[in-house]
Image: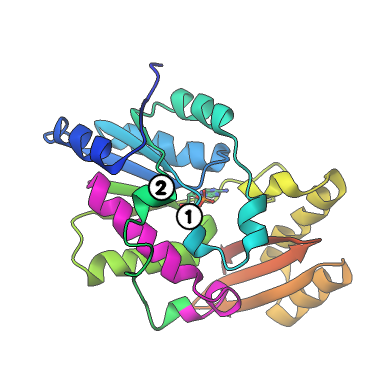
Amino acid sequence: MSQPIILKTTVELIQWRKTIKDKSVGFVPTMGALHEGHVSLLKKSRSENDINVLSIFVNPTQFNQAQDLDKYPRTWDEDLKLATGAGTDAIFFPTFEQMYPDNYTYSVHENDFSLMLCGASRAGHFQGVLTIVLKLLNLVQPNRVYMGEKDHQQLQLIKKMVSALFLPTEIVGCPTIRNSSGLALSSRNSRLNEDERNRSSLIYKTITTAANTAEAKAVLENAGFKIDYLVDVENRRYVAAFVGDVRLIDNVEL
Ligand code: AMP
């Protein structure tokens, strides 16, 4: 596989985009610390488009806690290897100044679903997510964007934003990739010690087997998890739970 081109500024990206204007472009936006979940998105994008673009940007506006932002894993060398192996043509790897020349004075608000679940406990989270995704879509101008069902609320909100703002792109939802014991792969898993990682597979097991949310909550609380939320919304069960100080999310169709 040939090395992807690395684009660090919006000007470089816009110039490069002009050189591929007749090709179909698939796009995978991420915050890096890539794992097999991200790789599955890149491979799907690779198989359905002429050109495959990855972005890596740890977006500060979607973190409501400075500590969580500081602790977010950054693994550029490994990311480059995985991205190259998955057939990535270009990696957009901008700085905050590149993405926020307005210093975040402009943003996207959604006044309904974004206030529930993760939005209820992380004030401003989805405002940051929607704003950065809109900026990235305007820059990359992809035909298709590949996003994980692991972040199902985020996926739904972005699909609805694309429709509400008439953006000319298709959002493709992709299945959650899990380890052999069921734990959803997440960049945050690298912050778990071995015992915490083993125990965390109980999250998926419990939300798939419990008869109702009360039972699932009780099982996880008894096992030492601190539950942020565990609710059923429209035929899907969503959970956010703390293992130590690491917050993990998951969801399953009921
Ligand atoms: P992140 O880097 O965590 O912001 O995630 C970037 C993209 O990868 C999002 O669309 C996530 O939903 C997706 N993603 C993260 N983890 C997984 C996973 N385990 N399986 C599938 N997609 C994932």
Residue 238: x and y, percent?
60, 70
State yes or no: residue 144 in magenta. no
Pointer 2 residue = 29
Camera-side residue: 69 or 218? 69
What SS does tag 2 mark?
A: strand
Camera-side residue: 89 or 175? 89
Mark 2 or mark 1, which is nearer the start of the sequence? 2
Residue 62: x and y, percent?
50, 63
Q: Which residues are magenta?
A: 115-143
Left or right relative to 169: residue 183: right
User: Which residue is rendered at x = 40% and y = 19% of the image?
Assistant: 3
User: Which residue is rendered at x = 62% and y = 78% of the image?
Assistant: 231
Principal SS element in the magenta part?
Answer: helix
User: Which residue is rendered at x = 35% and y = 70% of the image?
Assistant: 105
Q: Amino acid at mark 1?
A: Asn
Left or right relative to 195: residue 197: left
Where on the picture, by quarter, is residue 16? Answer: top left
Left or right relative to 252: residue 83: left
Where on the picture, by quarter, is residue 169? Answer: bottom left
Report whether residue 230 is seen. Answer: yes
Disc 1 crowd rating (10 Å Cα; few below 14, some 14-19, many 20+) is some
Find out if the beta carbon at label 2 lies less than 8 Å from the nearest ligand 1 atom: yes
Answer above or below: position of 236 versus 89: below
Residue 59 badge: 1
Residue 189: x and y, percent?
70, 48
Residue 219 badge: none
Q: Amino acid at mark 2?
A: Pro
Find out if the beta carbon at label 1 lies less than 8 Å from the nearest ligand 1 atom: no
Q: Quadrant of the N terminus?
A: top left
Q: Residue extending furthest left?
A: 22
